[in-house]
Amino acid sequence: MKEKDLKRAYNNVLAQVISSSQQYLFAGNLFGDIFVLSLKELDKGTEEPPGKLKIFPQGSTVDINCLQFCRDFLIVGTVGVVYGLQWNEDDEVLSTKRSWEVKIPMQSDAVEVPDVNSLWLSPDTDTLFAGCGDGIIYQISLEDGRIERDYRGHTDYVHSVVGNSNGQIFSGAEDGTVRFWSTKQLEQTSMIEPYTKSQLIRTDWGKWIGSVAVNDDWLLCGGGPRASIFHLRSLESTCVFDFPGRVHVCDFVDDGVFIGGEHNHVQSYTLNGMLQANIPVEHTACYSTVWQTAPIKFMSIAGFSNRLHILKDFRFLDSKIDLYGNVLGEEDKDSEVDLEELEAFTCAAAC
């Protein structure tokens, strides 16, 4: 099998982010490739398909688990390290050299280097929070690249880290808990366990929390348990969403709730749980969504597929954009991949 065909078949995009200028979309996959799309291509006002993407390989050993953007730096989270790449927007070029990197410390009882699974950037302080496979959240200063402190309490790997304008941090993990933190306190301030609630637990799918979203008053989370909204003060579940699959992404979007995961549709709900859009996708599983309302309104959905699914009104599928096979200057490679390479690629895509 040709390498390009194999990558098309097993492409798994875990991470997306929009540039600080809100003009470019970045998507990273488990093959170590970063794709860049100019959002102007989505705003042509014609039926013409979007133009080709640019690709910036990071190396076949780099699993791109999560992305963030700060000023003119793309921030990459992978196994054991967070690093920054300078983005030259005038030339549309991503540096091939790492401008800085922060290594995640390996705990004394650990048997492997922890993955960096989730990144959240505080827009007010340029402080980065990294949720990792060792169950720890690391607070990183982007001023000097120093790990300022860590947040310990989870007993299994962290899947999702987010924050709000009130200075609170929230994390969801494989241990089934969502924990609340403050940068001013050493210990967690609160905790919820969705799997303990009869209306949320789905026994066959476990207790893990795959995604957390938050605003000033409400928290949304889901995973093995059903997606639900919790009030931040009372910690009570006020609404349950009947998304039929395991939940890997959820967010508050445009006065509603958006949920995706291991299902052939992503869904949009009102805040009181009424389904308002059921959008078909090709992904075996949806692992990443990013969106904005201005200057170009769009949402991009990605996962185990070679395509980005684009929504311009957050209710209907507008277009699909191929990744491999749609790259500017991409050369036709005739090389064949042997069985060992096929197994390695397949494992990387599936893990």
Image (cartoon, rainbow, N blue to C red):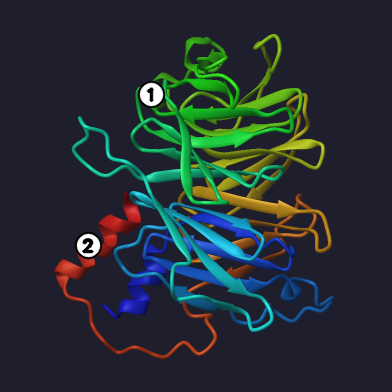
Dot 2: what SS?
helix
Residue 345 image point, x, y percent: 27, 64
What mark, if any, has residue 173 been given in the picture? Answer: none
Q: Nearer the viewer, residue 93 or 39?
A: 93
Please state which amino acid type lies under the numbered disc 2. Ala
Q: Is residue 179 above or below residue 119?
A: above
Q: Nearer the viewer, mark 2 or mark 1?
A: 2
Q: Which residue sits at x=38%, y=24%?
A: 204
Q: Is residue 317 above or below residue 111?
A: below
Decide: few, some or many residues near mark 1? Use Cα within 10 Å; few <14, some 14-19, many ≥20. few
Residue 305 image point, x, y percent: 47, 61
Question: Is residue 58 toward the left or the right of residue 287 in the image?
Answer: left
Q: Which residue sits at x=57%, y=21%?
A: 180
Please state which amino acid type lies under the numbered disc 1. Asp
Q: Is residue 167 above or below residue 91?
A: above
Residue 191 image point, x, y percent: 54, 15
Q: Is residue 323 visible?
A: yes
Q: Is residue 182 above or below residue 73?
A: above
Residues tagged 2 and 1 counted as in contact (Cβ below 8 A)? no
Q: In the figure, residue 335 lies in which quadrant?
A: bottom left
Quarter in which the N terminus is drawn: bottom left
Q: CA distance from mark 2 to mark 1?
A: 29 Å
Question: Is residue 251 toward the left or the right of residue 315 in the image?
Answer: left
Q: Which residue sits at x=56%, y=62%?
A: 74
Dot 1: what SS?
helix
Disc 2 marks which residue?
Answer: 344
What mark, if any, has residue 204 been given in the picture? Answer: 1
Q: Nearer the viewer, residue 133 or 84?
A: 84
